[in-house]
Image: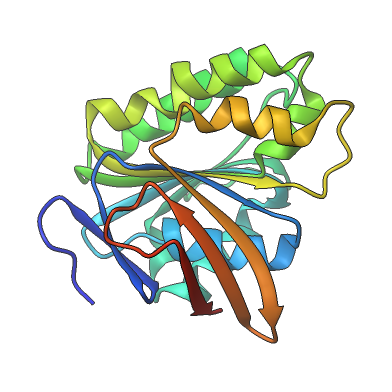
Amino acid sequence: MSATSQQFAVDADPISDIESGTSILLTGDDSATLASVFAKLVAAGEDEQSVILETERSGGAIRRTLNQTTMGAGSRSSILACEGRESDDGITVVDDPADLTGMGMQLSSLVTTSQQSVERFRTGIYLCSTICDEAEDARSVYRFLNSNFLTELRRGEGIGVCAFDTDTDLETDVNSMLTGMETSFTARIDVEKTGFKEAQLTVSGLSAVGETVDISL
């Protein structure tokens, strides 16, 4: 499926295209299902680049997931990972996961660098819930998202996806935190596993998509 101008193709029928500038808060309590939907949204097409902050897996692992989703997407990605080792092919290791200011600067730098080769980009955070667990308070997470992650979408042609595992044990009310975060995003997708390689999405903020849709993983 090819993307029309200003739209980003997604292999998650009936979510087929997403407008440039869209930011999505992606939530769910099954990490494997959440990771699969996340990959469908952030896997870069041939004229795009993915820039991903990965807090759970190594850069190599997320690249393999991207390739399984869209052929060649892994090679069109720049990864900022909290696990594993750096490499010369676009995998950078986070200096300090608890330093949101420094991590945000690293992420913004990767987005800027990616746009030197292609204009269109997809940014993603997997998982923001891990960042919340590391952070001192929710306000620092909000600042990180608004000052770095979401700001880049206003400067160029891109989309952003922030994944949050609602099963994460945080010392705060998760629903209240998500309500606060949601105001900064243009759309929200709640993911529920419904069967083997099947999920139901509850969608808000994507005008061309129904409120509840079923997809294959």
Q: Is residue 105 above or below residue 118?
A: above
Outermost residue toward the left in this view: 5
Specify the quadrant that holds the C terminus. Answer: bottom right
Vertical position of residue 64 compared to residue 6: above or below? below
Task: State the image coordinates of residue 195 (x, y, percent, origin top left).
Answer: 70, 84
**With respect to residue 96, does 166 lie above or below?**
below
At 51% from the left edge and 77% from the top edge, which residue is drawn?
A: 214
Q: Name the spot of residue 173 as percent of width and height, x first.
A: 81, 30
Is residue 135 something one can see in this rendering?
yes
Where residue 12 sits in the image (x, y, percent)? 42, 73
Residue located 25% across and 37% down the image: 115
At 50% from the left and 78% from the top, the residue drawn is 215
Above/below status of 37 relative to 156: below
Q: Judge from the rendering whether residue 120 lies leftward or rightward of residue 149; answer left or right.
A: left
Q: Quadrant of residue 152?
A: top left
Residue drawn where x is 57% and y is 47% of the image:
87
